[in-house]
Structure formats: C-alpha cells, structure tokens
Image (cartoon, rainbow, N blue to C red):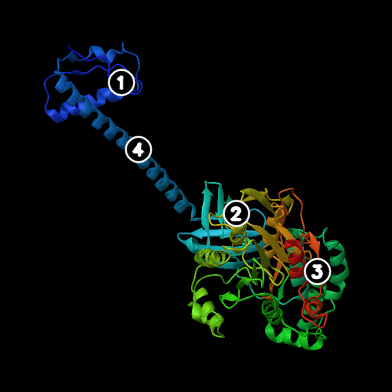
Amino acid sequence: MKVWEKFTSEPKKRKWRLFILKKPANWILKIRIGIIFWINSKNTDSSNSLTTSYWNVEFSKKKKKQLYEYSIQIKKAMICFKKKLVLCTLFCTIYSFSQQIQISKNSFWQQQGYDRILALKDSVYHYYNINDINCKVLAEGNFAGRFSVVSASDSLLVLNPGGIVNYSFKRINSLPEICSIQQVKDTSFEKNFKIFWLTFKDNYAFFKERNISWQQIYNEYIPKIRKLKTEQEFAFVLKEIVLKINDGHIRLEIPKALNSKINKSVQKPVRSLKSKAEVIKDIQQKYIETTKSYNNGVVQWGILKQSKTGYIVITDMNNFADYVPNPETDSKDFSPKYNAIRDTKVPLKLFDDELKGVEKIIKIILDDFKNTQSVIIDLRFNGGGYETVALQLLRHFVTQKKDILSVKAKTHDGFSPSQTYSLVPAQDNYLKKVYVLTSHKTASAAEIFALGTLSYPEIIRIGSSTAGIFSELLWKELPNGWEFSLSNEIYSDNKNITYEGLGIPVKHDMHYPKDPVSFYDTFYSSNNFTDKALEKVFLLEK
C-alpha cells in the first residue's frame, strides 16, 4: 500500500495523502507531514493539484502510526503558531493605536457641550473654559492621570474623566485666539455679570424645570449692575439670582473676607436642636444591636434589635478609599490624615481607590448580614459625592443587569447624544429584600443610587422624595477670579423620565419637611425619639 487513504480516528474522517520529494531528515519530514495534514484539513477536495506534485512513498504500519503522531504534534504546533500570529497582529494593532493616541497628544480639541477646549502636548494637558468673550485654564497636568482614552481618530476623541459619562471632542486646527491672550483680572461688574449670564445661557439645562426666564433675569438685573459701587453689592446680586433658580448644584465661591462680611449682614438661620451626627447616633442607640463603622462614619452598619434586618447608613458617596488604618478611622485625626494621602493622588487613581474601598467594606458588611432576611440602606443624610461610588454600592443589591439611566449634556443648540448606563450585578450581591430610605437631603450622587432603584421594583423606597439635583457640577470662573458652578447634564431613568427639581419619589411617604432643621426635629417630635421610616419597615416585615 503506497499511501493510506483515511484515518478513522479523525473526527471528520477526511482523506489524507502524504507526499515527499525525496528522503529527508526526520525533522524535515515531520514538518512536511504536518504541513500536508494542515493543508488537507482545510481542503476536502481529494483531486487537489497538490497531490500530483509529490512522489508516493510506501510506509510500514508502525511508521504510518509514528508519522501520524508526528503529524498531530505538528498540527497542534501550527494551531499554536496561528494563535500567536493573531496575538502578534493584535499587539501591532494596539501599538499602532497607541502611536495614534501619542500623535493626537500634540493637538487641540473642542468638547461637545461644556464650553471647554482641550490642548494636548506630549503627556501634558491644558483644559480651558471658554465663551465668546473669555478663555481661562480650568486645569492642567499629566494627561494619563486625568483621562482614560475610550476611542480616538484624527477628528474625534472620546475620553473618560473617571465617571460614568464620556466626553467627546472634535479636533480643531489651533487654540482659539482668545485663549492665547494673557488673561488679566477684570473687576468690571458689568463684564463679570455678562459672562455669568452668558455661561448659564449656553450651558444651564433646567430653566424650564426651574420656571426661570433667563432673558428676563438679564433685563431685570443689568440696570442694577450698572449702579453697583462695591464687590459686596455685586456678590449680593449674584447670590440673589442663584436663590431664584433654587438649584443645589449652583455654587458661588467668593473670597473668604468678602463672604464673611456678607454672612454677618444676613440673618442666621435657626439651628436644629440636634446635628446630623447626633440624629444618626440616636437612631443607632435605639434601634441597632451593635454598630460598626468605617472611615470615620462614612458607612455605619448593624442589625436591628430583635429582628433579622440589617441596617446601613451611608453619609457620603466619597471618602471610601482605604487610606487610614482601621483603628484610626473614627478618631479626630482621621480627616487630616485621609486628606493628606488623598491630595497626593491623581484623579483616576483616586477614583479607583474609592471603588476598591467600596469593595473592601461591602464584603465585610454583607458577611455580617449573611443571616438577615432584609436590609435597610439609609441615604436620608447623604448629600452626594461620586456617582461611581453610588453605583458600585448599588451593584451589590440587585440581581439583574439592566439599563438604569441615560445622560446627555446641554449644548448651545440642543443636547449631546444620550449615553446609556447599564448596571451589572456584583458576584457577591445581597439576594433578599432591600429597603432604601431617602429624604429631601438625599442629593446628587445619592440620588443617582435612588434613580437606579427605579429599574428594580422589588427595591422599596421609604421616606420622602430626593432633592432633585443630579448633574455633575460644571465649574466656571469669572474674570474677577470668582468661581461658580451650574447643572448642565440631564439624567433620565430607563423610561426617559427626568426628575430634576422633583426628586426620586418613594412608595411609602413619611412627609419629611424640606427644611433641614425641621427634618432633624421630626425625630424628636414626640416625648420619645422615633424614626418613622424604621417603624414602617417593622410593619412591612410582619
């Protein structure tokens, strides 16, 4: 028999032919056999012209078996080679892409929305706030520590600053001329007011929701501005306008000396009988068996007395990073030590440390709650922080992947394309009943947590609607050096409903007052300290 025609041990029982030109060395023979087998595995046509190019050779059964084993080894080697070739190609593609990014770092980019310009040179970035009459550097530093690259081309750059929203930039030929002019501090009240007004006009997303006619504001205040004599008067006017808008994400940062003068002339609000920390402490003393704490109380947890319900109060959506040893986390020295370490971190590293801190502590908490039948997440005293922290926490209390929200930014002529965020459950998540407590003080990133729960009807919200301020703070600066922020991003639920100014609703309303002083006092309205929301949970658990 000159050639074996078939190997029945092959899964597809294809016909094989072995041909060699002359008697080669063993290793050459092995390679040629492997190549022939490889080619024939891709070619089922037995009449292929390759079969006429070689001499037939007779083999003994033992030799045939040996050669067949060699061929299998070579075939495996060829598969391995193919995989390595793919990896090599992928590496070359990645390298090419990184080179493309490197080239892009000597360029200028205009952000879609936000009124900002990004200048890249080598590894350094300069981030400008810009409008028709002003341009000023907002931030600068090492590019790799501030942004991660989502995608890049010659004309479009998509970056992530560490949150859930990507920033899109279109390439421009050069830095606008106004940005090349040295900016001199300008204290003109009229110029500063016009830039303040123009910045809101171009970027603020919620005039309709806040029932504000911005043109009417200009018409009303420009005559007053022209009559002002002092900075204090100018600050009063801007604060008056901010109060009319009634958006908790609008901040006005003015010099401390000037601010203290204004505060002295303004009647101080009546203080609550109790502070936030005291209210939380009283809740724990009355309702919790033993309370544990992390990072100076940013998270506190325990199990409700005489029940199988866990309780977690989260007071902020930041300061989760594991920077300070646990024995010191509740000491008066915690904040200075924590802040000293935090301030050495570049933004992307800080955000990553925050998420690692979440993962560390949530595993401890869920282990403590392994024998509970339900859990309460108390966000009533949480004014916000990082939305990434909020959503990382929420991941541990859901069981299904869902699109939970979308975000778009205000532009001069409309809005940026909407970005959808999908929440993926954590592997070590809590599988039992979940209650979320909210109040009118639940704001910003804490509201993003509450917004996410709307996609999970099994999560029960109790308390009062949240504050209704969802956007990231868009920071700008006036020519006189004063800084201010505004809301330019629109967050919607998975049904495209927006809750700006309204807040996330609850299923069981405790009718908390909006005023913080009155809210704290509701816990002490009777002779005995009472938490109506926790009492409601007890009723629902029966």
The alpha-carbon separation of the residues under discs 2 and 3 comes to: 28 Å
- Badge nearest the viewer, 1 or 3: 1
**What is the three-letter code of the residue carrying label 2?**
Asn
Asked whether residue 398 is in view, the answer is yes
The alpha-carbon separation of the residues under discs 4 and 1 comes to: 19 Å
Nearer to the camera, 280 or 481: 280
Q: Are marks 4 and 3 in contact (CB under 8 Å)?
A: no
Q: Which residue is mark 2?
A: 166
Q: Residue at x 70, y 51 (%)?
A: 455
Q: Are marks 1 and 2 in contact (CB under 8 Å)?
A: no
The alpha-carbon separation of the residues under discs 1 and 3 comes to: 76 Å
Q: Crowdedness of circle 2 by 10 Å Cα count: few (<14), some, many (20+)?
A: some
From what the image shows, is residue 239 above or below residue 180?
A: below
- In the rendered image, which quarter is residue 163 located in? bottom right
SS of the residue under disc 2:
loop
Q: Percent from the top left, x then y, of residue 249?
A: 72, 68
- Earlier residue among tags 2 and 3: 2
- Badge nearest the viewer, 4 or 3: 4
Q: Percent from the top left, x then y, of residue 187?
A: 72, 77
The alpha-carbon separation of the residues under discs 1 and 2 comes to: 49 Å
Q: Crowdedness of circle 4 by 10 Å Cα count: few (<14), some, many (20+)?
A: few
From what the image shows, is residue 411 above or below residue 135?
A: above
Q: Residue at x 29, y 25 (%)?
A: 38
Q: Which residue is mark 3?
A: 246
Q: Crowdedness of circle 1 by 10 Å Cα count: few (<14), some, many (20+)?
A: some
SS of the residue under disc 4:
helix
- Badge nearest the viewer, 4 or 2: 4
The alpha-carbon separation of the residues under discs 4 and 2 comes to: 34 Å
Q: Which residue is mark 4?
A: 83
Q: Which residue is mark 1?
A: 40
- Earlier residue among tags 4 and 1: 1
SS of the residue under disc 3:
loop
